[in-house]
Image (spheres, rainbow, N blue to C red):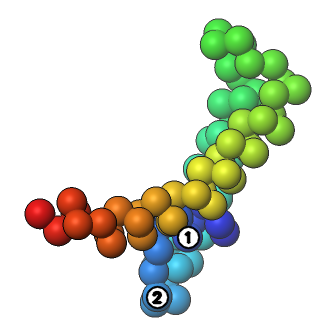
Amino acid sequence: MIVGETVLPARALALALVGCVAGSILYRLAVQLALSADAIGLQASDLNLVTAVLVAVALILPRLRAKAGRSPKAAR
């Protein structure tokens, strides 16, 4: 749900539901990438690393968006 709220921040229930589904799909894609990415040097044991990075980005991105919205450069 955290990933979905980051991808599609919404106030309406229908959009929140769509965001939740989209976040779930992105999470599953990240898991699949970690499990099948032998070509880029990831092992199956790196699954925790990939999912932790995804969740960390999902937690940090809303703050970066809010900070960018408040900066004077964004108003120009």
Residue type pointed to by label 2: Arg
Residue placed at 68% from the left, 42% from the top?
53
Looking at the image, which is closer to me, 9 or 29?
9
Q: How many marks?
A: 2
Looking at the image, which is closer to me, 53 or 19?
53
Q: Name which of mark 2 and mark 1 comes first in the sequence.
A: 1
In the figure, is residue 20 to the left or right of 11? right
Question: Label 1 belongs to which residue?
Answer: 5
Q: Residue furthest right?
A: 45
Please tell me the numbered disc located at residue 11. Answer: 2
Looking at the image, which is closer to me, 59 or 69?
69
Residue 67 visible in the picture = yes
The x and y percentages for residue 71 are 30, 66
Image quarter hosting the C terminus:
bottom left
Where disc 1 sits, the SS reads helix
Residue 22 visible in the picture = no
